[in-house]
Amino acid sequence: MICLGAVAQVSHPVSVRSDERPSMDKIQAYVDSLNALKDSVFTSKKPKIRREQRLRRNDMRLFLPLTYYGNVAEKLFTRDRNDNPILSELMHLYLARPDLVRGTDRMVQQQQTKLDDINAPIHHDPTLVEKVPETPVEPTTVPVEVMIKRPNFWTFNGDYALQFLQNYVSGNWYRGGESNYSALASLVMQANYNNKQKLKWENRLELKYGLQSSRSDSLHSFKSTEDLIRLTSKLGLQATKRWYYTVQFIGNTQFSRSYRSNDPKVYSAFVAPLNINLSIGMDYSVDWMNHRLKGNFHLAPLAYNMKYTRMLDLTRRLGIKDGNHFLHDFGSEFTVDLEWKMMESLTWKTRLYGYSTYKRTELEWENTFTFRFNRYISSRVFIYPRFDDGVRRDDHYAFWQLKEFASIGFQYSF
């Protein structure tokens, strides 16, 4: 008995799972035995039970995890000690193997489960699951070769055009007229700087030169029809998303002398005149109609204008006092530069320039309509009205001036 009790204390219980579920009678009998065991071990007032049942409960103490019960020593000195041999065995285990004692009856009472609250037995049906293969852990970082380029804030673009016009009229043409040939070459180059933060600098150089020959002019084999050198430079500091504080410079002159038919008088020449306008104001960037209309408005309440001529014979025509080469004045200025892509092959570029002082006003409106047949061939219509009340008044046109031409020829943009 002693050997059996010691083996029971050190051996772990083995549970055997059965697929067959117990009947309700067996479950009820098991619950009743647990209730009887609880009453015999933990309650002070024990019910009146038969001797065989009391012995059975004492036997169970020997096979449970070894616990020190205080009533074991007390009952060894009673008259019923001979009827309970299990008590002697428990006391022997307490003395011989104290290392097997796992707790006391007081500790068990503190951790006991209220068996009365269990209405139905708890069944555990564990299911076996196949071991899922572990997912390989990918590295959180992958080596990537990064090439860093120095940012380029400059953009360059340009437009080249060479237009020709030939008109032949026979000597007996019933409406009269004369044959003539004309050609027009133009070059527009732009270099713009924008650091995408606060600063931008726009530069545009426009070069135009046109020639015409006619039989009726006996003094000149060729005369210039279009002659322009113009540089526009604009430095802007961003104020808001669309507005910039801007300083603008505009300077223009021409390549060669200009004449009229059968007239030897020179009407203009290189640096005669030379116009320079320097203004301080604000720019508004335009990007409308789904990027089809782009450009800017420049409004300058303060502007300085200088007009110079190296030929004193032209001073009166240019509004400069006799004997002077320079004209200085201050006023206000505005410039509108827009480009509207009206259709896939039709583009309208317009430039409206105005300068005003208390004494005189200049207004120029340049309009260029370009119809592109393909990448290299295009046709142009140029309309250029101008108003200047600082020069001598004309008897027919007053202070208004007008230039217009139409041409077809080669054009290339990049």
Image (cartoon, rainbow, N blue to C red):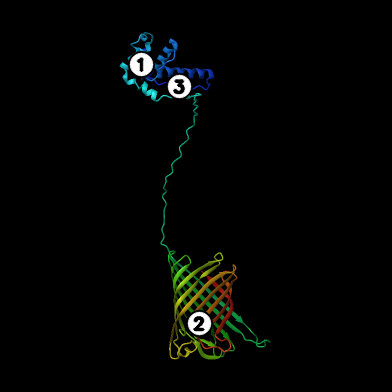
**Viewport quadrant of the N terminus:** top left
Q: Nearer the viewer, mark 1 or mark 2?
A: 1
Residue kind at label 2, given as amino acid type? Thr
Residue pointed to by mark 3: 15
The image position of residue 343, as x and y in percent, is 60, 68
Q: Are marks 1 and 2 in contact (CB under 8 Å)?
A: no
Q: Nearer the viewer, mark 2 or mark 3?
A: 2
Residue 134: name its quadrant.
top left
Residue kind at label 3, given as amino acid type? Ser
The image position of residue 15, as x and y in percent, is 45, 22
Residue pointed to by mark 2: 361
Q: Is residue 306 left or right of residue 23?
A: left
Position above or below: 77 against 363: above
Residue pointed to by mark 1: 71
Residue at disc 2, secondary structure:
strand
Q: How many marks?
A: 3
Question: Label 1, label 2: how many angstroms apart (C-alpha)?
Answer: 125 Å
Position above or below: 152 against 300: above
Q: Residue at x 56, y 82 (%)?
A: 402
Q: Earlier in the sequence, mark 1 or mark 2?
A: 1
Q: Is residue 72 left or right of residue 30?
A: left
Q: Are marks 3 and 1 in contact (CB under 8 Å)?
A: no
The image position of residue 106, as x and y in percent, is 36, 22
Question: Label 2, label 3: how many angstroms apart (C-alpha)?
Answer: 111 Å
Q: Earlier in the sequence, mark 2 or mark 3?
A: 3
- Does residue 23 appear in this view? no
Q: Is residue 137 left or right of residue 287?
A: left
Q: Nearer the viewer, residue 76 or 362?
A: 76
Question: Label 3, label 1: how many angstroms apart (C-alpha)?
Answer: 31 Å
